[in-house]
Image: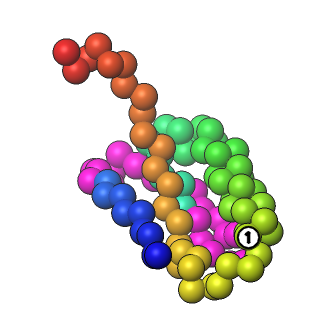
Amino acid sequence: MQTSLLGLVIFYDADFKFVSGNTKTGIPVKLWARNHFIDEGQADMALEMAINIYNSLTDIFSGTPNSARPPKIDIFAIPDYPVSCFF
């Protein structure tokens, strides 16, 4: 049974930037975050961790056919809002 995961993010692109890298199999990974997090270099470690996790999972599931792997990966760093602001 095939499963898919779909995420939809609507954002104003002037407020966000991205850092990018590639997995060892060449899949592009972009980590999107607010401008000041990218400018201060705070997203670099998160991008490195995401790529390392993907590479480790690729090693674990090495029998998975290439067609089951995503053509690209986009990660969005969403701010943590306190629950009380919604009530």
Quadrant occupied by the C terminus: top left
Q: Which residue is drawn at 40% across and 49% down?
A: 16
Query: Is 59 inside the magenta-drawn segment?
Result: no
> For this view, does 42 lie left or right of residue 33?
right
Q: Is residue 62 visible?
A: yes
Instruction: Quadrant for residue 82, please give it.
Output: top left
Instruction: Quadrant for residue 23, please give it.
Output: bottom right
Q: Where is residue 72 in the image (x, y as percent from the top left)?
A: 53, 73
Residue to which mark 1 is pinned = 61
Q: What stretch is highlighted in magenta?
A: 10-29
Looking at the picture, which amino acid does disc 1 mark? Phe
Q: Where is residue 67 in the image (x, y as percent from the top left)?
A: 57, 86
Q: In this view, does 8 lie above or below 58?
A: above
Give the secondary structure at mark 1: loop
Q: Is residue 71 above or below residue 74?
A: below
Taking the view exactly as shown, the residue that stands out farthest to the front is 1
Closest to the observer: 22 or 56? Answer: 56
> For this view, does 60 lie left or right of residue 40?
right
Instruction: Quadrant for residue 24, please give it.
Output: bottom right
Q: Residue at x 31, y 58 (%)?
A: 8
Q: Where is residue 28 in the image (x, y as percent from the top left)?
A: 59, 72
Q: Can residue 55 be seen in this view?
A: no
Q: Position of residue 49 (x, y in %)?
A: 71, 50
> For this view, does 63 lie left or right of residue 67?
right
Image label count = 1
Query: Is 25 inside the magenta-drawn segment?
Result: yes
Q: Which residue is drawn at 47% across and 76% down?
A: 1
> How crowded is the residue under tag 1: few (<14 C-alpha within 10 Å), some, or many (20+)?
few
Q: Residue at x 71, y 55 (%)?
A: 53
Q: How is the image coloured?
A: rainbow
